[in-house]
Image: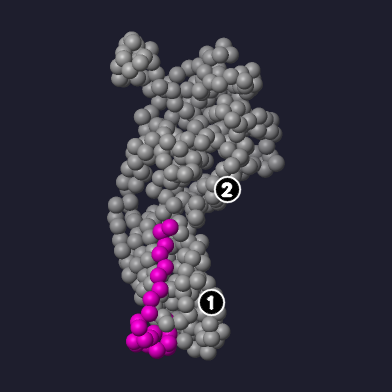
Amino acid sequence: MCLKINQFRRQYSANGSKGQSPKSYRLLTTFTVKNDSVHPMTIKNAAIIVAAGRGQRVGGEIPKQYLEINGVSILRRTINVFLNSKNIDYIQVVIHPDDQNLYDNAIYGLNLPHAVMGGDTRQQSVLNGLLAAREINPKNVFIHDAARPFVSERLIKELAENVEISGAVIPALKVSDTIKYMTDDFINNTIDRNYLYRAQTPQVFDYETILKAHETSKDRELTDDSAIAEQNGIKVNVILGSEDNFKITTEEDLRKAEMMTGKNYTDVRIGYGIDVHAFEEGDSVILGGIKIPYNKKLKGHSDADVALHAITDAILGAMAMGDIGEHFPPSDDKWKGASSDIFLKHAAKLVDEADGVIANIDLTIICEAPKIGPHRDLIRDRISEIVDLDIARISVKATTTEKLGFTGKGEGIMAQAIATIRLPE
């Protein structure tokens, strides 16, 4: 079996995926792990990302690991850290059986092994992940909660070095607040905080050792993997964790995460695009990448998609990079009859190459006919596919000019578009 791990470059989309899933990362390179074939002991460090929980305290109708932080799901952000880590050779994600569609959307475009289904408890889910890792037989295993997307490469590296010496290590933070033991809303006792630590993940172990410990303790409900190690007589080393490596549990945590990830996109640009095409004899028009039956077609050098042309110009305008005619001259026969999604993809690529993001698109189509309403959502969906932007950030409206002007006389169609772009300062 040939195991490949991919490196990805971040591409912001307003919602990490189309519908639930735009492509938040573009594939840059693929490399094979260590050897062309995987055999026992090829994999040194495997990561098991536990994403089977149902935690919904953050709010919303979906499990928190699939909520998005500035356009990218929490789970995808977590996976990306391990994909980019030089110390991780293999990734196994454990999910809830009801979340397959959410998971598929969240990892769209990533080359990962099939997810393992979790159990009724976190402990059972981790055990399922450990058992699945038997196929690649890693030396060490990193067990990490999906809701901690800000674990650093520095911490992963330090854990990888320590586990070679200790065989079991976790990151933790010393408790700084005074801790009270309460009963019936009254203080019963004050706990000595000098011996108290807040455990974090990833928790790292010799693979065979923690697998046996989990199998021995599979009927017990313990809250983390170091507790399972303790119960099986395994000494666990502790290194200093990070405050940034917090677990997203509440709405306040989510707001903090949004501030941490969104602070760089402060250069906001707005672009405006307008395009007009006349009718000629035909049997359909192309609008927003959708073929709409009609007794005429739009006249133009390309497919004359007036909607996509307007959006393309809006994006180019926001980027201060000219207009569609400069990038795709109508005098060039190369573009004769070309599909206009080529032009829009080019504009979106320019934003991506500038490490920018498309925040939203607002399109207005002006004509007496054909009727746009029945096709509005199809157009939004097609634009979403072309620019990898969540459909919730794409508006398509239609109006008439009350029989006035060339559109009112049914001589053609006009489209106007506004695009908002966010760039790092």
The residue lying at 37 percent from left, 38 percent from top is 251
Residue 12 position within the rendered picture, expressed as x and y whole percent measured from the top left? 42, 52
Query: What is the secondary structure assignment of the residue under circle 2?
Result: helix
Residue assigned mark 2: 101
The residue lying at 43 percent from left, 44 percent from top is 60
Asked which quadrant contains residue 329, the reply is bottom left
The residue lying at 33 percent from left, 10 percent from top is 189
Residue 274 position within the rendered picture, expressed as x and y whole percent measured from the top left? 36, 75
Q: Amino acid at mark 1?
A: Ile
Q: Which mark is residue 73?
A: none
Colouring: one colour
Tell whether position 411 is magenta. yes
- On screen, residue 118 versus residue 311, left or right, reads right
Residue assigned mark 1: 292
Q: Residues within 10 Å of mark 1 (few under 14, many from 20)?
A: some
**Of callouts 2 and 1, the N-terminal one:** 2
Give, as a single range, the part of the protein colored magenta. Answer: 392-414
Query: In this view of the protein, can residue 90 be seen by the observer?
Result: no
Q: Residues within 10 Å of mark 2 (few under 14, many from 20)?
A: few
Question: Total of numbered circles in the picture?
Answer: 2
Asked which quadrant contains residue 214, the reply is top right
Tell whether position 5 is magenta. no
Residue 376 position within the rendered picture, expressed as x and y whole percent measured from the top left? 47, 69
- In the figure, 192 relative to 11: above or below? above
- In the figure, 271 relative to 354: above or below? below
